[in-house]
Image (tube, helix red, strand yellow):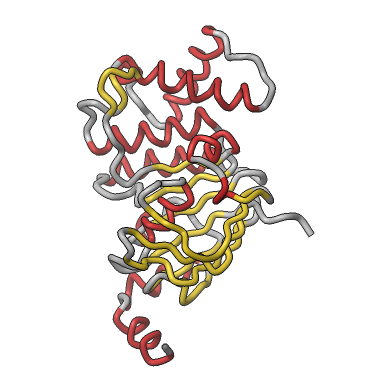
Amino acid sequence: MATPLLEIRNLHASVDDKPILKGLSLTVNRGEVHSIMGPNGSGKSTLASVLAGHEAFEVTEGSILFKGEDLLEMDADERAILGLFLAFQYPVEIPGVSNTQFLKAAINARRKAAGEPEIDALAFLKLVKDKARTVNLDESLLKRSVNEGFSGGEKKRAEIFQMALLEPELGILDETDSGLDIDALRIVSEGVNAMRSPERSFVVITHYQRLLSHIVPDHVHILMNGRIVRSGGKELALQLEQEGYAALEAEVAATA
């Protein structure tokens, strides 16, 4: 049996000594798209931050294996080089650092780790133009500092553009649909779908079923009170859209 791309077992994590994740387990195989849904405060963004290596979150119990390696022993940059990418819910601005400088440095870091030579200027320019078209990103934005002065939709497109350039093996989308209008949502989704492959997986964190109409998941998981309480197919997301979380929260409370 093939080794899972991502294997999370009994994960407990806290921030400022407040427990957030309380025994979360999840297995993601290569080529799969998993969606994680849940009410506010359930731990969705905490999971994304822990996977990416955010220092504010402390893992107190459990394990995370990525490509068979202990993710918790790695710094954030090592995780990125290994092939993990996080698209932020609220992408940050980095004044003074141009998008092209930032992206070329990131690409070359992965190439160096793989024992490959740095990408030359012409190959980089061609790659940028090709990927920018994928997410309908105005190339003039690439001459500006990272995310500085970008609209909400432009920031999200830029995140997907970065992911397309870096070609990670695992893409984690932390509420990428937040603040997007219908057209931007479609463009971002098309960018993600263009990257789907038998070797690449995604964990899509969202509040809304509307994103999953565009990025159709293989598995849907409901996260409540720091752990996954129910898993199913895309029909589970439709059920939540119709019924909300109240009935499921009552059911979980009754069995706790």
Residue 104 percent across, percent down from the top left: 48, 18
Q: In which quarter of the image is residue 180?
A: top left
Question: Residue at image x 52%, y 50%?
Answer: 202
Q: Please, is residue 194 above or below residue 28 in the view? A: above
Q: Is residue 84 visible?
A: yes
Q: Which residue lies furthest to the bottom in this view?
A: 254
Residue closest to the eye, 254 or 219: 254
Closest to the observer: 158 or 214?
Answer: 158
Q: How many marks?
A: 0
At horizontal 28% and vertical 65% (from top left) the residue drawn is: 40
Q: In this view, does 16 lie above or below 31?
A: below
Image quadrant in which you'd find residue 9: bottom right
Tell me which residue sits at (37%, 73%) in the image: 225
In percent of width and height, residue 198 lies at 66, 46
Q: Quadrant of the C terminus?
A: bottom left
The spot of residue 205 in percent (x, y) is: 41, 56
In the image, is 196 to the left or to the right of 19?
right
Image quarter hosting the N terminus? bottom right
Residue found 30% across the figure and 20% down from its top: 141
Q: Quadrant of residue 83?
A: top right
Q: In this view, does 61 lie to the left or right of 199?
A: left
Note whether residue 31 is visible: no
> Residue 185 at x, y = what percent?
33, 45
